[in-house]
Image (cartoon, rainbow, N blue to C red):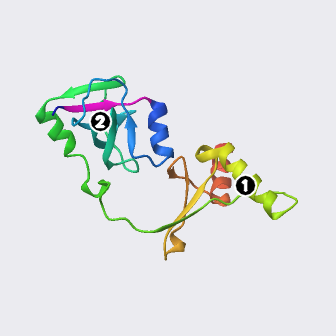
């Protein structure tokens, strides 16, 4: 079993941020099944896993709080045991895919002009598919604590308070 740092390109990293996936495509064929890997992109350590069937299967996802590290070009970088252990030490145990989970309420609200309820539902799904996570905010709150609702775009927190946006624009005008 070998240890690797897998550096993925910006597009793959964005895909990992936008969608819940269990695997990451390998950028090359160097790692073999059973090898352990750390995942990085754009100077961020964002996960860990094991190679199976030519893909990295996550054991840890740190997409919400990645750790800054020096990375090389996209591809697979072999790591010695000491370097792997040092980088592995940056991987928080609470981000293991087997860590306890809690329930969240997630919603996407879009005003839709339509001639019927059914037409509104069809237009809604068309908008969701067309705009996707890059443009539509998802509103997320822990179940039972709806007052802790937050907006996310591209998997990262996004300010949705119109008054805050107006203040930002006013500061830009000065």
SS for tag 1? Answer: helix
Residue found farthest to the bottom: 144
6 in magenta: yes
- Left/right placement of residue 143 relative to residue 60 reads right
SS for tag 2? Answer: loop
Depth order, front residue of 81/126: 126
Is residue 8 among what the camera can see? yes
Count of picture labels: 2
Vertical order, 54 against 166 (above or below): above
Q: Position of residue 46 (x, y in %)?
A: 35, 42
Q: Position of residue 15 (x, y in %)?
A: 49, 39
Depth order, front residue of 174/45: 45
- Left/right placement of residue 169 relative to residue 41 reads right
Residue found farthest to the left: 82
- Mark 1, residue position: 124
Who's the residue at 72% across and 55% down the image? Answer: 124
Q: Quadrant of the C terminus?
A: top right
Who's the residue at 37% across and 65% down the image? Answer: 101
Vertical order, 67 against 70 (above or below): below
The first of marks 1 and 2 along the sequence is: 2
Vertical order, 149 against 166 (above or below): below
Who's the residue at 79% across and 61% down the image? Answer: 118
Depth order, front residue of 107/26: 26
Report the span colored magenta. Answer: 3-9
């Amino acid at each position: 079993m070998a240890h690797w740092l897998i550096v993925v390109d910006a597009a793959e990293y964005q895909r990992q941020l936008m969608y819940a996936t269990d695997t990451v495509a390998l950028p090359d064929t160097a790692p073999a099944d059973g090898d352990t890997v750390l995942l990085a992109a754009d100077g961020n350590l964002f996960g860990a896993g094991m190679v199976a069937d030519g893909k990295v299967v996550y054991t840890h996802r740190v997409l919400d709080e990645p750790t800054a590290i020096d990375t090389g070009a996209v591809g697979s970088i072999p790591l010695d045991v000491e370097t792997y252990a040092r980088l592995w030490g940056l991987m928080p145990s609470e981000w293991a895919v087997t860590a306890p989970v809690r329930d969240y309420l997630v919603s996407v609200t879009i005003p839709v002009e339509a001639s019927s309820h059914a037409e509104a539902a069809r237009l809604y799904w068309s908008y969701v598919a067309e705009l996707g996570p890059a443009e539509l905010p998802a509103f997320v709150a822990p179940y039972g604590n709806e007052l802790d609702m937050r907006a996310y775009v591209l998997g990262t927190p996004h300010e949705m308070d119109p008054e805050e946006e107006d203040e930002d624009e006013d500061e830009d005008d000065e």
